Amino acid sequence: MLEVLLVLLGYVLGSVPTGILVGRAYGVDVRKVGSGNIGTANVMRAAGKGAAALTMLGDMLKGVAPVLLARALGAGPWVLAAVALAAVVGHCWPVFLRFRGGKGVATGAGTSIALAPPVGLGMFALWWVVALASRYTSLAAMVVTVVSPFAFLLSGQPLPYVLYTVVGGAAVLWRHRENARALLRGTERKFGGRSGGGG
């Protein structure tokens, strides 16, 4: 029963719309600006770097908190992986927004850092490298999503964690399908520009 409650908590925390809450604090409805997405990149477009930083931090904490809580309560690898997946699913399909949420990038980063800190931090650093080099946060997200399962596997992480990166990664890639098409067409918004996806 505790395991089920932990997974449900992961989903509920993941569903908290950080970007919308931060946007409101800055007097902006981020859903009416840019791509309309509630993630970090679009919040930057709508309300600036400070709001974007708060959104990224909040979205990452949505992934970190439930996983660390579950671990503190003695949950094993399978439950921890399920809690992590629930947080990402909650962010992508939040109950509070009629299941229309973000793309799972920052929340996924938070779960990865909580599950396996060295690997998760490495993937977070890779995201920044690709994002800053290409100016496409969506491309950075997709690169990290593809690389993560291999990083978890080759670093000897438990099988449930590896499977989580595959299933959770599939959700993130699905949420980025329009970004992938835009990248191929050359119409994807760039990070920090007026015309950036991936948030």
Image: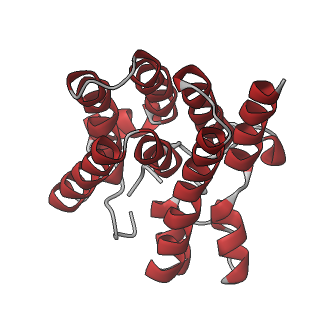
Relative to 103, is 89 on the left or the right?
A: right
Relative to 96, is 18 on the left or the right?
A: left
Q: Is 162 or 191 nearer to us in this picture?
A: 162
Q: Position of residue 184 (x, y in %)?
A: 27, 34
Q: Is 111 or 115 nearer to us in this picture?
A: 115
Q: Position of residue 43 (x, y in %)?
A: 54, 68
Q: Is residue 122 above or below residue 71?
A: below
At x 34% / y 53%, what residue is drawn?
137
Relative to 36, is 132 on the left or the right?
A: left
Residue 36 appears in the picture as rendered: no
Q: Position of residue 108 (x, y in %)?
A: 48, 42
At x 43% / y 49%, what residue is drawn?
198
Relative to 23, is 128 on the left or the right?
A: left
Q: Please identify the quadrant where the N terminus is shown.
A: top right
At x 26% / y 44%, what residue is drawn?
186
Q: Is 48 or 119 nearer to us in this picture?
A: 119
The single residue placed furthest to the left in the displayed view is: 133
Q: Is residue 139 above or below residue 59?
A: above
Q: Is 63 or 67 nearer to us in this picture?
A: 67
